[in-house]
Image (tube, grey):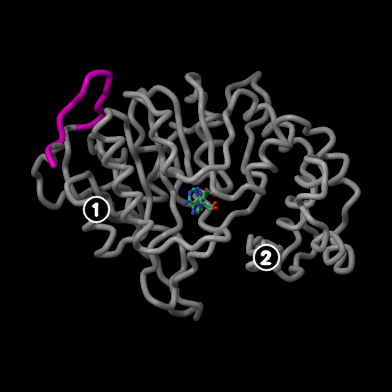
Amino acid sequence: MTLVASPGRDYTGAGHVRPVRVEGNAMSALASDRRLGEAPAGRPAQARPFLKWAGGKGQLLEELSSRLPARFGRYFEPFVGGGALYFALHGAGRLRAGAGLSDANGKLIDTYRAVRDDVEAVIAHLSAFSNDRDLYYQVRAWRHEDLDPPRAAARIIFLNKTCYNGLFRENSRGEFNVPFGRYVRPTICDAPNLRAVATALRRVSLRQQDFGNVPDRVKPGDLVYFDPPYHPRSATSSFTQYSENGFGEDEQRRLARVVRELDARGAYVMLSNSDTPFIRKLYAGLVIDEVLAGRAINSKAARRGKVTELIVRNYGAAAPRRSRTARQGGSRAGRS
Ligand SMILES: C[S@@+](CC[C@H](N)C(=O)[O-])C[C@H]1O[C@@H](n2cnc3c(N)ncnc32)[C@H](O)[C@@H]1O
């Protein structure tokens, strides 16, 4: 693979350098980075993710934002989940050219649509719920397909806020099967945030679709951020069942082909995944940064530690501001 600059691209860094290891306390070093920023005075409250989602990117936001191209066209996020990066970019005013969010999980996309299109009805339904075990199992038994969109969305949000660990898990019949959680006083209806989310989604295209359909819509200069279910670091950490479908190594390979296709079309591509030899090999030739994730890797508190994750890009490797970096190797990666 040989990487070359293509028309319409804006490379932020000093060419393609791989890999960059972010050392020291990169997260706190970047905590003062204001690129994502807070909403300027006079703007409505910044929307935050309204669902807890496995693999949510809250902890990696600064690392991701410091690696965005300086300018890009539209923004696409094909594994949107809770949409942490989308909402941060929206709050920072970086999505003026438009955005497309998608996910294979149809109930998730239905929920986004209902919040965008009829937020007051979603709030009204949600306000009627409370953190009650019997009510939880009653609402869990409702069928998503039988409900009107705002009620179906309120059900998903209610289950998400009150279920065990905020997991989204369904059985083979597509029935939500997570038990009641142990939260003392969960915020079930955060009306101001839901209204801010509705505003943030106003002109956004929302689709239930497989990530493989995304390239058709992407033009040169657009940015696509992929946050797929992670490749398991070991056989025991294989929580890859996000939806009704698993996401095995064949899917990771298929995704890597989509990334190469978008690269060939002149789009900017950024992807996060776990730091495994398999993922490094899949994206060899692109810019690969190791970053520290705040995630615990061992259930025994005393042995908890930070693990590295990978951020892969097909464009210049700007070193994160104010963090110490040690570049390993200095060759220019290329595109063929
Ligand atoms: C790691 S989560 C995304 C987390 C998200 N970035 C966040 O901040 O909350 C992965 C998402 O991929 C979706 N997914 C799984 N297989 C998919 C596929 N083939 N195409 C599109 N989305 C898929 C899951 O439904 C899940 O929402």
The amino acid at mark 1 is Arg
How many angstroms separate mark 1 from mark 2 (CA)?
A: 44 Å
Left or right of 308? Residue 83 is: right
Q: Quick one: quadrant of the C terminus?
A: top left
From the image, give the main secondary structure of the stretch colored magenta.
Answer: loop
Packing grade of label 2 (10 A; few <14, some 14-19, many >=20) is few
Q: Residue at x 16, y 42 (%)?
A: 17
Residue 334 x/y as whole percent: 13, 38
| Residue identified by numbered label 1 | 21
Q: Residue at x 78, y 40 (%)?
A: 149
From what the image shows, is residue 304 above or below residue 7?
below
> Judging from the image, what secondary structure is the residue with disc 2 in?
loop
* Magenta-colored stretch includes residue 8: yes
Start and end of the magenta stretch? 1-13
Residue 23 x/y as whole percent: 28, 55
The amino acid at mark 2 is Arg
Left or right of 44? Residue 333 is: left
Q: Quick one: quadrant of the N terminus?
A: top left
| Residue identified by numbered label 2 | 173
Residue 283 x/y as whole percent: 24, 51
Q: Quadrant of residue 198?
A: top right
